[in-house]
Image (spheres, rainbow, N blue to C red):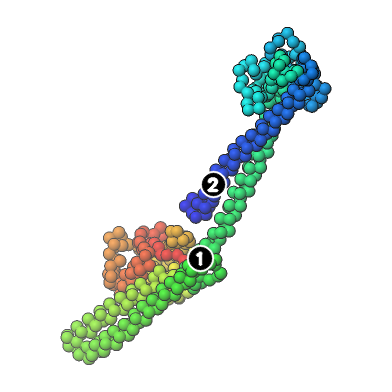
Amino acid sequence: MKLNSLAFRLFATSAAWVLLVLPLAAVIIYHLYRDDVQAAFDARLEKLVSSIAADSMSSEASEPIAPKNRYEPLFEDPRSGWYWQVAPIDNKQAVTLRSASLGDGSIDLPIERDIKPDGDGARWTKATGPAGEGVRVVELIDNPGPPGEGPRYSIIVAGPIDWLDARLSSFLTRLGTALVLTGVGLVAVTLFQVRFGLLPLRRIEKGLADIRSGHSEKLAGDLPDEIAPLQVELNALLASNQEIVDRARTQVGNLAHALKTPLAVITNEAREDKGPFGRKIAEQAEIMRDQVNHYLDRARVAAGAGVIGRATKVAEVLEPLKRALERIHRDRGIAITIDCPPDARFAGERQDLEEILGNLCDNACKWSKGKVSVEVAATTSRRPPGRLTIRIEDNGPGLSEAERARIGKRGVRLDETKPGTGLGLSIVTDLVQSYRGSLALAQSSMGGLRVDLVLPAA
């Protein structure tokens, strides 16, 4: 998954949203649960202190009595963190009642610390228990005998804060584990969703690659409703492109026939005149015919260059070419070695590749002293487009730098003893440029000339 891709953008935004929402949800859930546990814990303390106050503050007695019902078994467990205490406020000499768990210890009275009561008259605070532990304390103020007529007493119930913290910590661990697993699952589902959702685009990519490589002529297959119009438009564009190319080729062919016949008539008529005027007319007519053929060929190549779906296997062009050239030059013992991957393909017309390689290999054989080497390498990719590199070398006399600069010019021949018109390399250069390729001449490691040819690969 590349950084600059739709898949990464969709996945990254979804994953970021998950990683943002889950921690926020964890904080909210934890605070809600903490408030609920705190409220339940306080309600339990409030119920215990109300029950102890009701049992210890008899309306018929002059002093508090120990409650008969302890309500909480941990009140009997020493230093358990659960304590109750009934202590005098107005008469410090009066007896103080304590739970068995409190022993001879005591809890500071919230009323003496100026803790304000709530709406129910209960005072809430935190204190330190006899074992040094933190406790949550609730206090009620009451008196034995008739309400408001006897000495006041502080009725306290305390519960361990550790009990509350332990439950919150346990819940937080379970909540964190659950949300982490949820996050991992959501990220995995998001990844699957992105991959599955963008799968039709991969099919389109493969279909277009098949069209460019010549395996298919249109974008086929069933696509989702959102992408189906794109498929229709692409196929219509491909059909329109092919129609334009076919029409251009037809017009070029018609023009060729229309020009060749008058030129042939002019040439024939001029040749019947044996004088200098007739020879001049025939000479110029030949030049015109060469120019017409040259530019018609360029127009044909320009119409076909870059057309989607054109592909030619290089090996299928080189092998027959090797056999033909070795047969033509068999009296000189020319041996051509070819190193070409079987899957190397040229993105263009077969006849254009035959023209290019035929001219270059034939030129190498003419100047070679017996050895010609052809090496082919291909890089296939869509971004950037693949390139086909062809290197042709011979062990002939080679060319100087100045000669290499001159030889590409149209009609220039360095050795008049060799057959030819001097147009071969110029034609090759025109063809290569039509396909947006490149051609360079250099000194070969075999001693002769090296031609480095770069063409588009399918």
Left or right: residue 238 versus residue 98 is left
Q: Is residue 350 visible?
A: no
Location of residue 112 (image quadrant): top right
**Who is closer to the viewer here, 308 or 128?**
128
Left or right: residue 279 versus residue 90 is left
On the image, the x and y values in percent for residue 396 come to: 38, 64
On the image, the x and y values in percent for residue 139 come to: 68, 22
412 over 66 or under it: above or below: below
Task: Tell me which label, 1 or 2, sits earlier in the chain.
Answer: 2
On the image, the x and y values in percent for residue 310 come to: 45, 71
On the image, the x and y values in percent for residue 453 come to: 39, 63
Q: Is residue 287 visible?
A: yes
The residue positioned 30% from the left and 75% from the top of the image is: 295
The residue positioned 34% from the left and 80% from the top of the image is: 252
350 over 2 or under it: above or below: below
Q: Residues within 10 Å of mark 2 (few under 14, many from 20)?
A: few
**At label 1, which amino acid type do we have?**
Ile
Give the secondary structure at mark 1: loop
Mark 1 against mark 2, which lies toward the viewer? 2
Give the secondary structure at mark 2: helix
According to the picture, the residue beneath numbered tag 2 turns out to be 17
Location of residue 431 (image quadrant): bottom left
Left or right: residue 239 versus residue 87 is left
**At label 2, which amino acid type do we have?**
Trp
The residue positioned 76% from the left and 24% from the top of the image is: 54
**Who is closer to the viewer here, 57 or 199?**
57
Query: Which of the numbered marks, if any, corresponds to residue 227?
Result: 1
